[in-house]
């Protein structure tokens, strides 16, 4: 018996030492693009599913059929979740293919309410799923769960309609962020009216958004108010310093009229979106970039805040600012939000997508 115990102890020591050597060697590829072996993935999947089931089994579920709860959840989901989990009619984006494990498409099935609440509140280790309970109360999280029970089966038009009708959310308003103040008139020439789609119904009207572009006048009708407001939830100042530095450099380059610096920060595949209109990097360089530079040259920008969120080799930087500008010959105060997706490119960061939303600041 004594010999058996000594043998087992020796064997365990060898195993522990072997594991230590393996970990310390760094030979294991931790990259998200090098997937686990099937046995390891099956083990981790079972661990995740059993853990969620166990921790969620005693959660009391409220009435999820409340129309107002569902409506609130639609706005929350559109602002916080579509980047990873998509929505009805939404095409695959640039971020999802790089996430491992792949986030589920929540428009295709109805998750168990208890488990959905627990995952949204507490997040999941070793994944891109954050713990939203740190910045949202239980009632708000239940609103998202309620919406998840209704979203499967929705048409894209039905989804856009319910998001457009979602109420203004205080948590979204209070989220930090400094934004590229984008979109008003540069004395005399108008680049059209854009809407900050999906903001509160009181803001679902045409917002002054115009630029002077090479002396020409370009008009774009305001798009229907269907786009959810950019949510800056989860953005924390200093979370990804390199990405934030790139975002500030991008803003400064636009404000100083440095075209070369702007384009150097944009990845070749970058997309620039505003007011329901999206351009490629080359289209933006040939069209709207000149108008932005002309506009920002005369605008007065007041940064409000800026924060970031790490996502492996990618990051999100959200910001907000106030802007004093001239809209169709009249002075105006605008509130603008910017959301940048960036990826690590060696020692620097490249911007792969830009989203801007601008709306007039309501008069007191």
Image: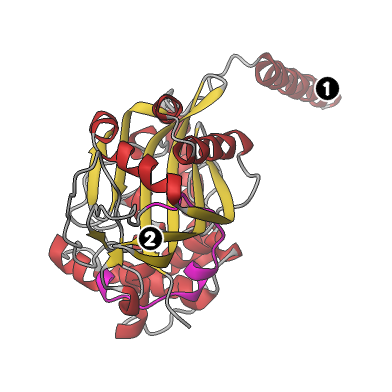
Check disc 1 and report the residue beneath it. Answer: 6
Of the 4 image quadrants, the one containing the N terminus is top right
Residue ID at (57%, 21%):
347
Task: Give coordinates of residue 5: x percent, y percent.
Answer: 81, 27
Q: Residue at x 20, y 71 (%)?
A: 161
- Left or right: 228 in relation to 47: left
Disc 1 or disc 2, which is closer to the eye? 2
Asked if residue 141 is among those painted magenta in the image, a careful observer would answer: no
Neighbourhood count class around disc 2 (C-alpha, 10 Å): few under 14, some 14–19, many 20 upward = many
Pick the residue in front: 344 or 18: 344
- Residue at position x 48%, y 83% from top? 364
Q: Where is residue 21 in the image (x, y as percent from the top left)?
A: 71, 15
**What is the quadrant of residue 210 in the picture?**
bottom left
Q: Is residue 134 visible?
A: yes
Q: Quote the CA–CA distance across marks 1 and 2.
A: 83 Å
Q: Nearer the viewer, residue 170 or 303?
A: 303
Region of the chain picked out in magenta, as a range: 163-182
Check whether the beta carbons of the residues at disc 1 and disc 2 lie within 8 A of each other: no
Q: In this view, does 230 lie above or below 9?
A: below
For the residue carrying disc 1, how many other residues have a C-alpha within 10 Å: few (<14), some (14-19), or many (20+)? few
Mark 1 lies on a secondary structure that is helix
Residue 105 in the image: x percent, y percent? 29, 51
In terms of secondary structure, what is the magenta stretch mainly?
Answer: loop
Task: Give the answer, above or below, for where 249 lies relative to 316.
Answer: above
Res 62 quadrant in image: bottom left
For residue 177: magenta?
A: yes
Residue 326: give its label. Answer: 2
Would residue 145 be visible to someone looking at this image?
no
Reply above or below: 178 against 195: above
320 sits left or right of 207 in the view: right
């Amino acid at each position: 018996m004594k010999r058996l115990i000594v043998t087992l102890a020796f064997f365990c020591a060898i195993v522990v030492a072997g594991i230590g050597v393996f970990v310390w060697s760094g030979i294991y590829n931790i990259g998200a693009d090098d997937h686990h072996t099937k046995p390891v993935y099956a083990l981790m999947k079972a661990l995740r599913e059993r853990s969620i089931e166990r921790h969620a089994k005693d959660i009391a579920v409220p009435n999820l059929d409340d129309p107002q709860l569902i409506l609130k959840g639609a706005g929350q989901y559109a602002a916080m979740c579509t980047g990873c989990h998509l929505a009805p009619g939404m095409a695959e984006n640039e971020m999802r293919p790089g996430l491992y494990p792949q986030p589920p498409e929540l428009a295709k099935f109805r998750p168990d309410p208890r488990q959905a609440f627990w995952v949204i509140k507490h997040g999941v280790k070793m994944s891109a799923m954050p713990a939203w309970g740190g910045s949202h109360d239980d009632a708000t999280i239940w609103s998202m769960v309620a919406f998840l029970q209704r979203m499967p089966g929705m048409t894209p038009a039905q989804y856009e309609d319910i998001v457009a009708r979602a109420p203004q959310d205080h948590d979204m308003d209070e989220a930090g962020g400094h934004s590229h103040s984008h979109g008003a008139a540069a004395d005399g020439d108008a680049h059209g009216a854009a809407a900050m789609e999906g903001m509160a119904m009181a803001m679902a009207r045409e917002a002054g958004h115009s630029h002077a572009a090479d002396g020409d006048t370009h008009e774009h009708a305001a798009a229907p108010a269907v786009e959810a407001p950019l949510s800056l939830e989860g953005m924390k100042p200093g979370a990804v310093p390199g990405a934030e530095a790139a975002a500030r450099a991008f803003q400064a380059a636009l404000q100083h009229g440095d075209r070369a610096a702007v384009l150097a920060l944009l990845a070749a595949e970058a997309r620039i979106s505003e007011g329901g209109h999206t351009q490629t990097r080359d289209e933006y360089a040939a069209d709207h970039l000149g108008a932005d530079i002309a506009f920002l040259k005369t605008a007065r920008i007041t940064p409000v805040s800026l924060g970031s969120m790490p996502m492996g080799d990618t990051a999100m930087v959200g910001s907000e600012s106030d802007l004093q500008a001239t809209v169709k010959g009249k002075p105006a105060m605008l509130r603008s939000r910017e959301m940048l997706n960036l990826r690590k490119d060696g020692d620097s960061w490249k911007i792969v997508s830009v989203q801007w939303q601008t709306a007039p600041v309501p008069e007191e």
